Image: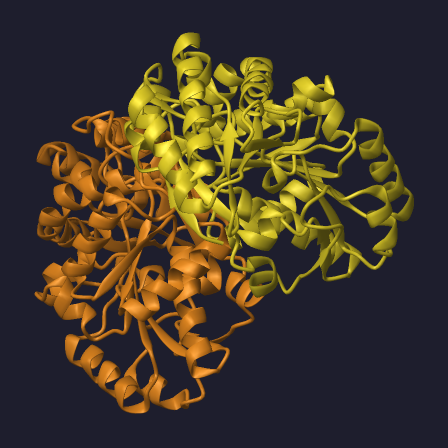
Chain colours: A orange, B yellow
């Protein structure tokens, strides 16, 4: 699939997406209130890393947690450990799982684990899919929300049913919670209440939380202790991980309490956008701070419209568009601090302009 | 082998080892002259990472370079690429190679590569060892200097002969140059003159250079492009690596010009220490900024002597001791900015005290 950047987005006075630009300010801010004689973590030990791990483990309701440089590393390792315990080198997940489409097939190349794809690309995987996969599986991974289909979620009942089924069958259940904090308002359940359905959990600190990078893998102590050995093997046991940890901690404190605001923002914006005839949003009602915006225009014309809206109104609605067919494309919108600070009249002006330009482009 | 910390070392007024404590100051200093609106690298792209890669590639005389979070990751990946090209899953190196003793067997567990150990634990590997290994090998790794035996180096002639032999036989030769900058003064050859003997090179930024963490893998563009795919698979292709890059760049500029001073410091200190009857240094004449100090005393008594010297004189000579037999132990000393700033009379006072206490302990 082709992608096109929306050229003017990086210059937008009012970018809609996320919380802040990816500049050095992120790290400078994270260090602002720190003492310069505070000791670094050293190869996974020391107060700085251990206290953060303990804090996040408690938040997720898990016995133990380990900080990783990336979710890619954390999740491959979790699946490797589960697959070895089950003695089955197969992991099941959605066809658009991060491991399947963004990791250059690392799970197989490094760990010899085969993927079993459940369900279909355009919908959530269901309890029926899980039941149909059989029991010869090392681990089942669920991603909440399912990012590549706009951030969709199963009902909590369905989630509980899948969890119950896996426990009955002895199948380890892992949560790709890259955007876990973002779904707390919709489910109206705490992180711990969601995580208790899973045997292991990964969370990210640079999605909705807007930190620098880094991830946590949480579960029982057996799992996390083993994961440290694998972290060393992967080359992720750095002498110092503190830049990411300090930023993660700051982002967690700052933005975790704002997830309801972001969720409401996503609902509001998606509702406004879906009034345009050439647009539709997926999911129709956002269930987190994100949604996908589908545009019934060819890629280059959609990019040109979004570019013009951005230049004329100052509002950057999208940073890129991705082709979905010869006549349509889509983009991803996730709401953070930036959206919340856009003056209402500016946004409405941009949306009116967007509607007019889309209409003109469709009529050409 | 048992290790004992020298308890008072962390409080020493004059620690001998390295350049600075591992505190947040390292990162705060690296950001000091940076503008807060400078853009982050993004998944291995962007001016910040690309300009540093280009700079280090030029310094090492290689076509291309890739920044990695760790040497563990960079080296496993280099060996994987060479082994796949040769279609032989065997890598040859010294028995005390980092991959063999510090990486939890990651090379085999993740890459299915078997290690072929050349030479012996107590000496450098030689051209004869290389010739004896046969040609069914995916890659040969040389570590310069060989850290775990005190930082020893082959003669440059021997190095050239090994390189020539490998080229004749078509065996890829990789340099573990974790301490490459540290050997430039002894060989009296530039980094590029050393690296041209090798097909790929890894260098570290937190050993003698004293940066935060991070590594470069350099070689031809085919190798480095492939290494980026593997970096993604390993979970090392972080959205932002800039904390390490900024620190690495600063450390390189600051300390690369000081390597001769550190080398001279190591020769001076090792010569003074070897006057004590209970001590001997390996190598007898340092060839870099480091050496091992062997102590003819049982572990606990050596630790107690070093502790007392540190407390009474303020000079921290060693941070730990490692048992080598029931009656002996050793420690590692590497020279950086700290040694250079210790007043001569303080150091001499500490060495006199050390000699007296070692004599008393040996007589007990």
Image x and y of residue A79, in percent = 41, 70
Name the one closer to the observer, A135 or B293: B293
Q: Is residue A146 above or below residue A156?
A: above
Q: Is residue B53 above or below residue A207?
A: above
Of all residues, the one furthest to the right in this rendering is B168
Name the one closer to the observer, A273 or B353: B353
- What residue lies at 55% left-to-right and 67% top-to-bottom? A108
Image x and y of residue A141, in percent = 35, 72
Q: Locate residue A245: give its quadrant.
A: top left
- What residue lies at 76% left-to-right and 36% top-to-bottom? B198
- What residue lies at 76% left-to-right and 33% top-to-bottom? B154
Q: Locate residue B197: give its quadrant.
A: top right
Q: Is residue B198 left or right of residue A223?
A: right
Image x and y of residue A119, in percent = 39, 78
Q: In the rendered image, is residue A253 in sight?
A: yes
The C terminus of chain A: image quadrant: top left
Image x and y of residue B173, in percent = 76, 43
Name the one closer to the observer, B296 or A335: B296
Q: Is residue B97 above or below residue B58?
A: below
Q: Is residue A60 left or right of residue A136?
A: left
Counting the numbered discs, the total is 0
Q: Is residue A71 left or right of residue A115?
A: left
Q: In the rendered image, is residue B18 in sight?
A: no
């Amino acid at each position: 699939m082709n992608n096109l950047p929306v050229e003017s987005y990086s210059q937008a006075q009012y970018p809609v997406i996320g919380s802040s630009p990816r500049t050095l300010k992120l790290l400078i801010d994270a260090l602002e209130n720190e003492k310069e004689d505070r000791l670094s973590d050293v190869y996974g030990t020391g107060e700085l890393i251990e206290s953060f791990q303990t804090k996040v483990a408690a938040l997720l309701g898990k016995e133990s947690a380990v900080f990783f440089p990336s979710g890619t590393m954390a999740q491959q390792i979790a699946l490797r450990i589960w697959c070895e315990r089950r003695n089955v080198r197969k992991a099941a997940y959605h066809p658009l799982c991060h491991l399947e489409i963004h990791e250059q097939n690392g799970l197989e190349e490094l760990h010899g684990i085969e993927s079993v794809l459940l369900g279909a690309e355009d919908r959530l995987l269901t309890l029926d899919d899980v039941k149909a996969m059989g029991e010869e599986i090392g681990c089942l991974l669920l991603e909440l929300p399912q990012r590549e289909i706009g951030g969709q979620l199963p009902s909590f009942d369905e989630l509980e049913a899948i969890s119950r089924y896996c426990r009955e069958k002895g199948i380890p259940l892992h949560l790709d919670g890259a955007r876990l904090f973002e779904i707390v308002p919709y489910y109206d359940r705490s992180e711990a209440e969601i995580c208790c359905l899973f045997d292991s959990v990964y969370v990210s600190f640079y999605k909705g939380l807007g930190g620098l990078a880094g991830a946590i893998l949480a579960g029982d102590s057996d799992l996390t202790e083993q994961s440290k050995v694998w972290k060393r093997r992967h080359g992720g046991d750095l002498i110092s991980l503190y830049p990411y940890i300090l930023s993660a901690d700051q982002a967690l404190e700052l933005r975790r309490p704002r997830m309801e605001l972001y969720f409401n923002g996503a609902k509001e914006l998606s509702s406004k956008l879906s009034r345009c005839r050439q647009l539709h949003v997926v999911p129709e009602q956002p269930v987190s701070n994100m949604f996908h915006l589908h545009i019934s225009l060819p890629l280059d014309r959609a990019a040109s419209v979004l570019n013009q809206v951005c230049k004329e109104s100052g509002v950057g609605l999208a940073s890129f568009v991705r082709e979905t067919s010869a006549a349509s494309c889509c983009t991803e919108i996730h709401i953070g601090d930036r959206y919340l600070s856009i003056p209402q009249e500016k946004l409405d002006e941009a949306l009116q302009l967007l509607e007019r330009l889309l209409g003109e482009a469709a009529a050409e």
